[in-house]
Image (tube, rainbow, N blue to C red):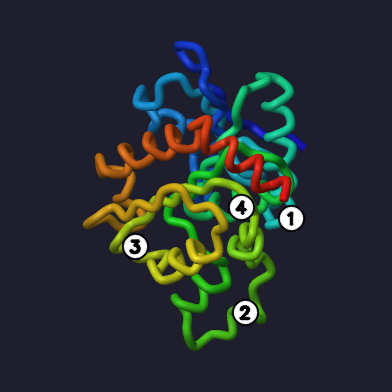
Amino acid sequence: MRLVGALRRADTSSRCLLLVFGGNAEDADWRLRHFGDWLPGVDIATFFYRGYGPSDGMPSETALVADAVLIHDRMAERLGPCAVIVAGLSLGSGVAAQLARRRPLTGLILLTPFNSIEAVAAARYPFVPVRRLLRHPFRSDAALAGLPLPVAVIAAEEDDIVPPRLTRRLIDALALPVLIAWVRQADHVSIYEHAEYREAFVRAIDRLLEPTLAEVTVATSRR
């Protein structure tokens, strides 16, 4: 099986590797271009989910999480980064949360995240027994509950796909939330057009790379 992605190295010395897991059927090349030049000093890697674009295979929660672990390990081995931050966007927030349970990370940045896919589906289709029908629940709240990992959350105040109350339920499950940003007058799609989103993303990386925060995280994980 073949997984296809894109890697952009930092123009200056790299502060970290940013692994990006995008939304449903997202074009990884487009997402890399989206970051433009506003994340200096960051190596950025993105991938097409299996079954989408040029990547082979059939998507499922188990498969996407296994791919995320493989991608993490290959990129860490190839680049030897001093820090690894994982960004999960929409559906990718569920993949990122599961990866955080399986590999040691510097931190997470979750964009328009949910507590679980089944909760999102139940909110959109309240009269359908979706919990019995869904095969891939992506329980981000269960994956991150009690995990001593710094997490930044950036959400849209007017999200029409992931109800804000479901994002708040995920936030409630976090052990170490270090930044919570709600982008005003933004929905699930338009959030990426707002300057507030970019400013919050940059702040999140800076916050996750603070040495004192890393020391607190290590101390907490040793308890």
Quarter of the figure with residue 75 = top right
Q: Percent from the top left, x then y, of residue 82?
A: 62, 23
- In the drawing, does residue 178 fall left or right of residue 197? right
- Name the amino acid type tagged 4: Ala
**Mark closest to the chain's N terminus, 4 or 1:** 1
Residue at point 65%, 78% (across, down): 133
Identify the residue position indicated by label 2 in the image: 131
- In the drawing, does residue 55 fall left or right of residue 184? right
> Element type at marker 4?
helix
**Mark closest to the chain's N terminus, 2 or 3:** 2
Q: Work out which residue is located at the far left of the displayed protein and give it.
A: 185
Separation (CA) of disc 3 from disc 4? 20 Å
Q: Residue 62 has which mark?
A: 1
Q: Residue 124, relative to residue 199: is it above or below?
A: below
> Element type at marker 3?
loop
Separation (CA) of disc 1 from disc 3? 27 Å
Q: Residue 97 has which mark?
A: 4
Q: Residue 159 has which mark?
A: 3
- Name the amino acid type tagged 2: Arg
Q: Percent from the top left, x then y, of residue 169?
A: 48, 69
Separation (CA) of disc 4 from disc 2? 20 Å
Is the Cβ of the residue at disc 3 closer than 8 Å to that at disc 4? no
- Name the amino acid type tagged 3: Asp
- Name the amino acid type tagged 1: Thr
Question: In the rendered image, which quarter contains the N terminus?
Answer: top right
Q: Percent from the top left, x then y, of residue 156?
A: 33, 57
Question: Along the line of sight, which residue is nearer the eye, 180 or 165?
Answer: 180
Separation (CA) of disc 4 from disc 1? 13 Å
Label 4 packing within 10 angstroms: few (<14), some (14-19), many (20+): many
**Mark closest to the chain's N terminus, 3 or 4:** 4
Residue at point 68%, 57% (across, down): 61
